[in-house]
């Protein structure tokens, strides 16, 4: 058997992951053909590289189809209920930093905190007859966060991309999205709520609690953990 | 699955179904009409009623024609809708069937289970109707040793209405009665216990709040923002809710004792807060009605904040029956008064309504264990 390691299949997240493992003596590489999602592992035997969309890695870990996987904290917590029962965090990789935050138009001079957002949502619903809309793709995380904060009279609307643009196009009044520098927020005349930080996310190496392993697999995993200095 | 496991599961389900049918017959014998609402409910009604939180509790599905549908998370809403659309008065209904609840935070709890319920729509004597539902459900549960919890959201609501403060503050507190943490935060702010955020002070002190402001984008317009700034100014000029009133609210929220003591306690509080007297009279009438139905009211627990964190339609009497020593289990039966819900779903019409449900599956488990 082999240990399957799931890694994002493209972009900076893949490159940075390759670098992170390389500096620890594990060389990951994509096959020569750019179009083929296959790869190779050198420096340790019996580890197989599986290239996947970062968004699918949480599900594959939960199902036990891969033993290890690199993906964002945000994706694991959004997609897996009781995530810590399904996967174990082995290492934070120190890149792919992004904050999931709630943002409103910068010109909302009366709204600075969640408390303000709640009051504004109540008045908005009263005047317009529908709930204040918050565009996001992180439905679970945002809903849990707002429930804990006691914010009411809002509705989440799904936005899988260009989320910051939804306010200008009047399909949402506020957004909950990932930001790293705040540039996109500013460019779209939005501001983060002062207490609107939902989650700090970064690329993280996870171990599946569901993947089956035999004795040699366990040895392979131990050896890999030693190399990448994870207990 | 092993064949004998499958057989056991089938037998267990059929036992639950039988028990549900038996319970429904008890309610039918008490004069209820049997109703059978569909499993799929239009999502917009439930979403409008409960907001986004319902998505964390109910399963949503959809098709390209009808749009979003929900697997019924309870029977109360469809029964109220049905009654408000074409029910005669007074009416008593019973139903039995499965409800569906997501349990992402408690994966060990059932996400699909039977409920058998009894709902009363009757203007004549709300106290008697409360007692009727409570006593009938207790009787249907048989002689299992259960702890009954009761409460009354109406007391807290009346206390809020009676506060010596602005309507805006009362409305904000009323809106958050079912979210205890936000209720507390508001109360702290209105009573001056919590500091006003600096950005709020800066906004109110600013000669021109719009100076150096980014361009305004989105549907929420300048009128919305000006209206809120005006409301904030009015609030800033409002004197704090007095320590004395906060202490009285805290005293109400802290009540958790047997009914005779709770009533005595409330009577003491009402000397300083006469606004709760009508709600207290309703409670007194209910106690008399419960007693007339043979309930041992002297031993009945009353908790003034009971039911505040459940589904937010209960606005008066609330109750639940729990297995002794099994705080890990949800209540085997629960219910309450939901007059406001009939108003929301009644499109102008309203009727006092009270009801409750039993979980036959849980009831069988408890019976087997005892």
Image: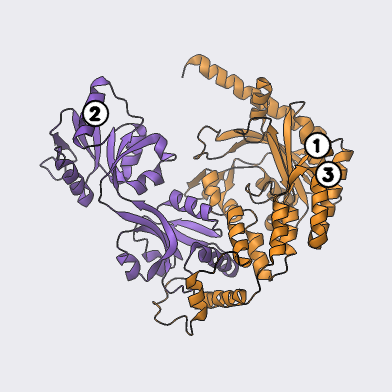
SS of the residue at dot 1? helix
The residue lying furthest to the top in this view is B4
Tell me which chain appears orange.
B
Residues tagged by mark 1 and mark 2 found on one chain of the structure: no
Q: Nearer the viewer, residue B82 or A176?
A: A176
Q: Position of residue B1 (x, y in %)?
A: 46, 19
Residue underneath mark 1 = B299
| Residue at the (63%, 23%) spot, across then down | B14
Is any atom of residue B89 visible in this view? no
Q: Position of residue B229 (x, y in %)?
A: 54, 76
> For residue B60, which numbered disc appears in the image?
none
| Residue at the (84%, 46%) spot, across then down | B286
Is any atom of residue B250 visible in this view? yes
Residue underneath mark 3 = B260
Graded by Cα atoms within 10 Å as few (under 14), some (14 to 19) or many (20 or more), the crowding at tag 1 reads few
**B215 over B104 or under it: above or below:** below
Do the residues under discs 3 and 1 have CB atoms within 8 angstroms?
A: no
| Residue at the (51%, 57%) spot, across then down | A155
The residue lying furthest to the left in this view is A32
Q: Nearer the viewer, residue A12 or A193?
A: A193
Residue underneath mark 2 = A222
Residue A166 in which image quadrant:
bottom left
What is the CA distance from the residue labelled 3 to the residue labelled 1?
8 Å
């Amino acid at each position: 058997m082999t240990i399957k390691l799931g890694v994002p299949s493209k972009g900076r997240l893949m490159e940075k992951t390759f670098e992170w493992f390389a500096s620890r003596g594990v060389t990951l590489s994509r096959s020569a053909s750019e179009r083929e999602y296959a790869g190779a592992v050198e420096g340790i035997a019996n580890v197989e590289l599986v290239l996947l969309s970062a968004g699918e890695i949480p599900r594959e870990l939960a199902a036990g189809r891969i033993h290890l996987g690199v993906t964002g904290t945000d994706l694991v917590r959004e997609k897996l209920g009781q995530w810590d029962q399904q996967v174990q965090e082995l290492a934070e990789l120190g890149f792919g930093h992004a904050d999931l935050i709630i943002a409103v138009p910068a010109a909302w001079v009366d709204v600075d905190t969640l408390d303000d957002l709640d009051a504004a949502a109540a008045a908005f619903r009263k005047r317009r007859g529908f709930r204040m809309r918050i565009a996001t793709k992180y439905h679970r995380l945002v809903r849990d966060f707002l429930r804990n904060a006691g914010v009411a009279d809002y509705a989440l609307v799904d936005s899988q991309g260009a989320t910051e643009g939804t306010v200008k196009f009047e399909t949402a009044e506020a957004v909950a999205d990932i930001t790293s520098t705040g540039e996109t927020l500013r460019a779209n005349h939005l501001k983060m709520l002062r207490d609107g930080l939902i989650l700090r996310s970064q690329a993280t190496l996870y171990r599946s609690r569901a993947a089956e392993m035999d004795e040699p697999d366990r040895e392979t995993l131990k050896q890999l953990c030693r190399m990448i200095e994870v207990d | 699955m092993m064949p004998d496991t499958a057989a056991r599961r089938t037998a267990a389900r059929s036992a639950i179904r039988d028990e549900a049918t038996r319970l429904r017959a008890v309610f039918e014998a008490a004069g209820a009409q049997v109703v059978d609402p569909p499993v799929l409910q239009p999502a917009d009604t439930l979403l409008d009623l409960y907001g986004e939180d319902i998505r964390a509790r109910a399963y949503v599905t959809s098709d390209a024609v009808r749009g979003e549908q929900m697997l019924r998370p309870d029977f109360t809403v469809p029964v109220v809708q049905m009654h408000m659309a074409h029910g005669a008065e007074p009416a008593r209904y019973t139903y039995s069937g499965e409800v569906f609840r997501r349990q992402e935070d408690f994966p060990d709890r059932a996400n699909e289970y039977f409920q058998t319920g009894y709902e009363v729509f009757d203007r004549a004597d709300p106290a008697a109707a409360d007692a009727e539902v409570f006593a009938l459900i207790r009787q249907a549960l048989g002689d299992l040793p259960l702890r009954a919890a009761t409460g009354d959201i109406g007391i807290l609501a009346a206390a809020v209405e009676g506060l010596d403060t602005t309507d805006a503050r009362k409305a904000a507190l009323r809106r958050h009665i079912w979210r205890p943490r936000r209720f507390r935060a508001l109360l702290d702010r209105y009573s001056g216990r919590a500091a006003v955020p600096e950005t709020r002070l800066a906004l109110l002190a600013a000669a021109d709040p719009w100076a150096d402001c980014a361009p305004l984008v989105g549907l929420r317009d300048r009128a919305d923002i000006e209206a809120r700034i005006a409301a904030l100014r009015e609030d800033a000029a409002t004197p704090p809710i007095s320590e004395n009133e906060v202490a009285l609210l805290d005293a109400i929220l802290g009540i958790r004792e047997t009914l005779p003591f709770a009533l005595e306690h409330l009577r003491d509080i009402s000397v300083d807060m006469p606004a709760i007297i009508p709600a207290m009279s309703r409670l007194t009438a209910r106690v008399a009605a419960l007693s007339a139905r043979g309930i041992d009211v002297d031993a009945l627990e009353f908790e003034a904040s009971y039911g505040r964190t459940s589904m937010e339609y209960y606005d008066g009497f609330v109750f639940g029956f729990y297995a002794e020593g099994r705080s890990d289990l949800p209540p085997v039966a629960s219910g309450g008064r939901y007059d406001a819900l009939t108003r929301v779903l009644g499109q102008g019409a309203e009727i006092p309504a009270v009801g409750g449900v039993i979980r036959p599956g849980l009831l069988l488990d408890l019976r087997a264990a005892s």
